[in-house]
Image (cartoon, rainbow, N blue to C red):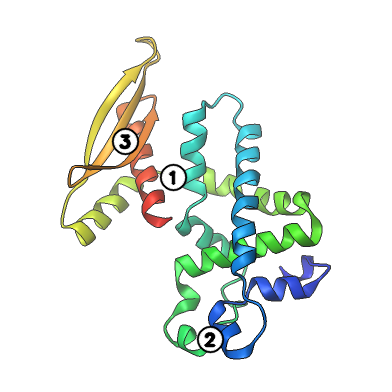
Amino acid sequence: MKELFHDPALYDQAVTHRTWAVENGGEDNERLEFLGDAVLQICVTRLLYERHPQAREGELSQTRARVVNTRQLAQVARDLGLAKEIRLGRGEETGGGRDRDRLLAGVYEAVLGALYLDAGIDAAFANVSSWIDRATTAPTEGAKNQLQEWAQGRKKSTPVYEVEHSEGPSHAPRFVVVVRIDGEVVGRGDGKSKQLASHAAAADALSRISS
C-alpha cells in the first residue's frame, strides 16, 4: 500500500509497532490507530447505509459489528500484504507478533488513518469499499460453530440461544434472539427466522469477544 501515499513517512509510521519504536526510536503507530478506528467506523457506516437501503437500524448495526472486528480486520491486513510490512521489535517478532490478529487489525487501522491524513476521506473510503462487499457477504453459518468452540475451550460451557421476542405481522415476523454463556448475555441478533436470528446473535457475540 505504500505506493498509494504521497508521504511515504506516514505509511512507515503506520506500520511501526511500539516495540520497534522503543528499540530504534521514532514514532509508533498508536495515534494513527486511534484515528483510523474512527475513520473506519464512518466509512463502513456510510457504505452499509448506501448499499442496504431496506435494512433496518438493527440489521445495519449487526452487519457493521461483523465487519469491524479484530478477526475480519486482521484478514484485511493479510490480504493487503501488511503482515510482511510491519516493523516489530525483536521480542515481538520472535514471539509471533506478525501473525497476531489484534496486532494486524491495529496496523490496518493505523494505515487507514495515515491514508486519511495523506489523501483524504475519499481515499480511505475507496480502500474500505474495496473489501467490504466480500466481508458482508461472507457466510455466517459458521458463527455458531465458532462460538461453541470458543465457549467450550475457554469457558467449558455451551452457548444457549433464547428467543427474546418477536415482532411484525404473522406473514413477515422478525425474531430477536440472545445467546448466553454461563447465564450471561454475550450477543443479540435479529432475523426473519429463529435460525437467522441465532446466527446473527452468534456473530454479534464473536465480534464482542474479538474486539
The kind of residue on which mark 3 rests is Ser
Q: Mark 1 points at which residue?
A: 139
Residue 195: x, y in percent? Answer: 31, 32
- Which element carries disc 3, helix, strand or loop? helix
Q: Work out how far the residue at label 2 is from the one at label 1, CA to CA, in angstroms.
A: 36 Å
Pointer 2 and pointer 1: residues touching (CB < 8 Å)? no
Q: How crowded is mark 1: few (under 14 residues within 10 Å), some or many (20 or more)?
A: few
In front here: 103 or 18? 18
Counting every numbered tag in the picture gives: 3
**Residue 89 - label:** 2
Q: Quadrant of residue 2?
A: bottom right
Pointer 3 and pointer 2: residues touching (CB < 8 Å)? no
Q: Image point 62% across, 33% down: which residue?
A: 49
Q: Quadrant of residue 196?
A: top left
Q: Which is nearer the N-term, disc 1 or disc 3?
A: 1
Q: Image point 59% across, 78% down: which residue?
A: 84
Q: Name the residue under label 3.
A: 198
Quarter of the image for the C terminus: give it: bottom left
The kind of residue on which mark 2 rests is Gly
Q: Work out how far the residue at label 3 is from the one at label 2, CA to CA, in angstroms.
A: 42 Å
Left or right of 171? Residue 7 is right
Q: Which is nearer the N-term, disc 2 or disc 1?
A: 2
